[in-house]
Image (cartoon, rainbow, N blue to C red):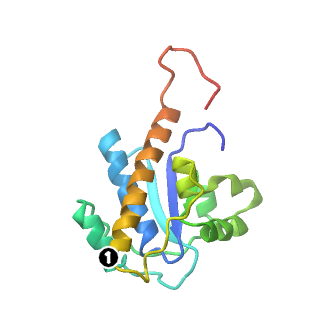
Amino acid sequence: MSAKPIKSILFVCLGNICRSPLAEGVFQAVWAERRGLARDMLLDSAATSGWEVGSAPDPRAMAIAAHHGIDISGQRARKIMPQDFHCFDLILGMDHSNVADLRALAPAAMRDRVHLFLEFAQGKARNVPDPYYDGQEAFAEVYRMIREASEALATRLAARASPPDNGQASSTM
C-alpha cells in the first residue's frame, strides 16, 4: 500500500447486512471521536453478493450498534460495483472469502487496495466471523472485534496522516 493518505474506505462482507454495516458505523463513530465531524473520510459498505440489495441491516446488528450509541438503521445493502475500486482508497473484506472475491473482481491495478480488515487494522490474519446464523452473543462478539479493529485502524491512519514530530520528513510510512 502506498503512503498516500487514505481518504475513503469501503467495508465489505457477503450480504452487507451484518458485519460491513457494523464496521462502517463503528469506524465512523471512532473516527468522529478522534477527528471531530470526520468529514475528511468517505465511508461506505457493500456486499460481494446481491442477495440482500436494498435491505436494512439485520435487526441484531442494529440492536448491538444502538446499544453502543451508533445508529446504522439508515444504511441499505448494496452490491460492490466496478467503480468502487476506483472510488475507494482502501477496501476491507471481513473474511478471507470476501477478500478473494474482491481481488477477483478488482482491476489488476487496484488489487493492492483490497485487504482483510483485521489484518490491515491489527496485523491479525483472522476473519470477522459471520454472525448471521448465530444469536445475539455472536453479534456482540463481532461488535467487539470490529470496535478493537476500528480503534487500531484509526490510530494507524492518523499516524500516516500526521507529520513527524521532529519536523523532518519521513519515508517510513
Compared with residue 156, is residue 68 higher up or lower down, i.e. above or below?
below
The image shows a total of numbered marks equal to 1
Residue 37 visible to an observer of this rendering:
no
Q: Amino acid at mark 1?
A: Gln
| Residue 56 coordinates in the image, percent (x, y) | 36, 78
Residue displayed at 51% across by 21% down: 164
Assign the N terminus to one quadrant of the image: top right
Image side of residue 12 versus residue 36, left or right: right
| Residue 120 coordinates in the image, percent (x, y) | 57, 50
| Residue 50 coordinates in the image, percent (x, y) | 54, 82
Residue displayed at 51% across by 69% down: 46
Image side of residue 14 versus residue 1, left or right: left
Residue 67 visible to an observer of this rendering:
yes
Residue 40 falls in image quadrant: top left
Residue 76 falls in image quadrant: bottom left
Q: Give the secondary structure at mark 1.
A: helix
Residue displayed at 66% across by 40% down: 2
Residue displayed at 53% across by 55% down: 118
Compared with residue 55, is residue 61 higher up or lower down, i.e. above or below?
above
Crowd class of label 1 (few under 14; some 14 to 19; many from 20; radius 10 Å): some
Name the one closer to the observer, 24 or 118: 118
| Residue 49 coordinates in the image, percent (x, y) | 57, 79
* Residue wearing tag 1: 136
Assign the C terminus to one quadrant of the image: top right
